[in-house]
Image: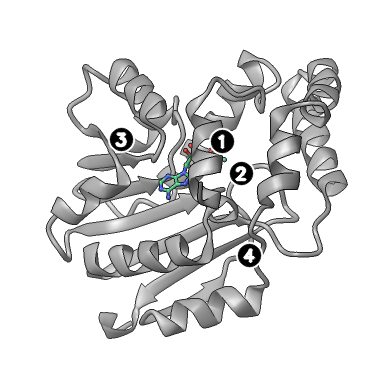
Amino acid sequence: MSETSGWVDFWNRDTSIYVNPRHKMLHYRQVAKDIAALVPGPDAVVLDHGSGEATAADLVAAKCARLYLCDAAPNTRAKIAAQFANDPRIIPVAPEDLSALADDSIDLIVANSVLQYLDDATFDDSLLTWKDKLKPEGRLILADVIPPDVSPVTDAMALLTFAREGGFLIAAGVGLVRTALSDYRKLRGELGLSTHTEAEILARLREHGFTGRRMARNIGHNPARMSFEARKDDSGQ
Ligand SMILES: C[S@@+](CC[C@H](N)C(=O)[O-])C[C@H]1O[C@@H](n2cnc3c(N)ncnc32)[C@H](O)[C@@H]1O
């Protein structure tokens, strides 16, 4: 089993990563607000790659014409389809469906908190697909990228700060202990998480025909992680 399928199997189950329903709601709401702020205009076509359940995707859809939520986990896609059955702007897709989308058709692609679960080959394949599908003037955002020097303790502190502000601090404390004893911890030991330096991401983008830069602020609640924006080299920008 490859690294990616191991992690996808994990995300395909009901995970205990969100310490309670409030955590999950606040998490997806913040991510959706951050993505919505990047949408260039009401006619935009947006791809959220590795979207997870994206329970607040309606906030993004309200700012664009069409929102593809792409996730490798079939159960996650089924949850998206069920939640947004009445919103024709929101379309769940599998990664293998992306090749059927027209080239040069997407204005904004966001991959938030996903690169850590991709092995090198999958990351490269994804960059090739994203380059094909982005419009010449489109924007690719790689967000919540974990630098090699960020420890699980830093992630835990970021969660506790988010929890204190969001009113679920006690649940977060309990959840951290549960995660420490969970299959996430076990899988992290077995499969590892991919980490990347800023220089490596920028070089990787260059190799795939993008010009990138690190953004001032990360998407989501963890300021120790990094976000990047990139445009195709031939975008003329
Ligand atoms: C940590 S979750 C992030 C969810 C969401 N983007 C967020 O910010 O909360 C990672 C998601 O990436 C998905 N995933 C992992 N590998 C993928 C791949 N190769 N293509 C698409 N989705 C993938 C997993 O199924 C999981 O839902």
Q: Earlier in the sequence, mark 1 or mark 3?
A: 1
Per the image, the residue denoted by label 3 is: 61
| Mark seen at residue 220 | 2
On screen, residue 42 above or below 28: below
Q: Quadrant of residue 150?
A: bottom right
Q: Pick whichever, 14 or 200, lies toward us.
A: 14
Check disc 3 and give the amino acid type. Answer: Ala
Q: Which residue is mark 1?
A: 30
Please tell me whether mark 4 sits on a helix, a strand or a loop: loop
Q: Position of residue 198 (x, y in %)?
A: 65, 74
Q: Residue at x 26, y 48 (%)?
A: 96
Q: Under tag 3, what secondary structure?
A: helix
Name the element at disc 2.
Answer: loop
Q: Is residue 7 above or below residue 234?
A: above
- Asked if ligand 1 lies within 8 A of label 2, the reply is yes
Q: Amino acid at mark 4?
A: Ala
Instruction: Count neighbours of disc 4 (C-alpha within 10 A) and say few if under 14, some if 14 to 19, many if 20 or more.
Output: few
| Left or right of 42 on screen, residue 148 | right
Q: Residue 216 got which mark? A: 4
Residue 209 to residue 228: above or below: below
